[in-house]
Amino acid sequence: MSREPSAAVGAAGTGTATGTVREPERTGPVRARARHRHGFGHVFGRVLLFLLLAAFLVPVLFPVYYMFVGTFMEPRELSTFPPRLLPTGVHPENVQGALAAVPLLRMYTNSLVMAGIITLCQLFTSALAAYAFVFLRFRGSAVVFALFLSTLMVPAEATFIPNYLTLTGWGLGDTYAGLVLPFLAYAFGTFLLRQSFKQFPRELYDAARIDGMGHLRFLWTILVPLSKPALTAVGMYVFITSWNMYFWPLIITRSTEMQTLQIGLNSLKVGESSNPGLLLAGAALSVLPTLALVIFGQRFIVRGLTAGAVK
């Protein structure tokens, strides 16, 4: 049989046997112009976003930049207005003067020891407490955890006097033990690790128990290696907080040999009016460890703080 004219016309006019209407395909130059317009708009949007973010970053990063640059400026360069963006030369006198004014190297060591011990101990205690709240079923665990978190509402300054009286009564004043003992456990690290541990399926714990694993072995051989982002985030937070601690080391230490770096920086303020470069040099030296931690571990901070946010 011969094809009907209407079907033939539909097939010829639309390019399909069903007669459906199809938009004419774009030719090569038309497609290229559309792709060019889309690519230009995408690039322009990204450039505009980059410039906007850079404008917001300038007031945040300029003090940090000027702190490092001002470390190698002369006093007359620091007192000029508008401030110089670059020094006329490298002048290490500020660093040498800061090291000579106070024993910064000894204070640096004290701060590293204090922050390192507190960080390791809080990671240990927080991991144990978070494991208990997630994998050990006991009556009233929710109430205990709520009471545990309520300690975050108590200002740390409110506990300094009782801690000072207790530690000095034990003869631990002006010692490393006196610096670190009040901060060996903290509820914030437990909270973050608990949120991370809750992401792991209960079946993993049940399978390990069936295989004969004890609680500590399961924690240190399976759970801890899988929770490195959260542990790194907690460790960095605790280290930076301990490194910047000022009030507690000030009241528990008496000798210069046991004082921390933040106390030494406060001592440099005496010469701030005559030579602010000393204070800038001390601040630059103190910020180096925390700045390195933030730069190289920022991805762990984000992943650790968002642990448990999405099921």
Image (tube, rainbow, N blue to C red):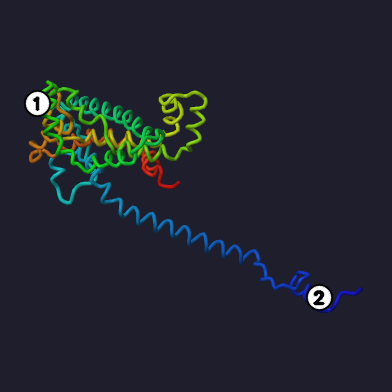
Pick out the residue farthest to the bottom: 5
Q: Residue at x 24, y 36 (%)?
A: 241
Q: Quadrant of the N terminus?
A: bottom right
Residue labelled with disc 2:
7
Q: Nearer the viewer, residue 230 or 185?
A: 185
Q: Residue at x 42, y 26 (%)?
A: 215
- The Cα–Cα distance between marks 1 and 2, rounded to whole angstroms, is 101 Å
Residue type of the residue flagged with mark 1: Arg
Q: Nearer the viewer, residue 200 or 1?
A: 200
Helix, strand or loop at label 2? It is helix
Compared with 221, 38 (above or below) is below
Q: Is residue 155 left or right of residue 120?
A: left
Q: Mark 1 packing: few (<14 Cα in 10 Å), some, or many (20+)?
A: few
Q: Residue at x 69, y 71 (%)?
A: 22
Helix, strand or loop at label 1? It is loop
Pick out the residue farthest to the top: 171
Query: Total number of numbered labels?
Result: 2
Residue labelled with disc 1:
254
Residue 76's spot in the image, x, y percent?
13, 42
Residue 238's spot in the image, x, y percent?
28, 35
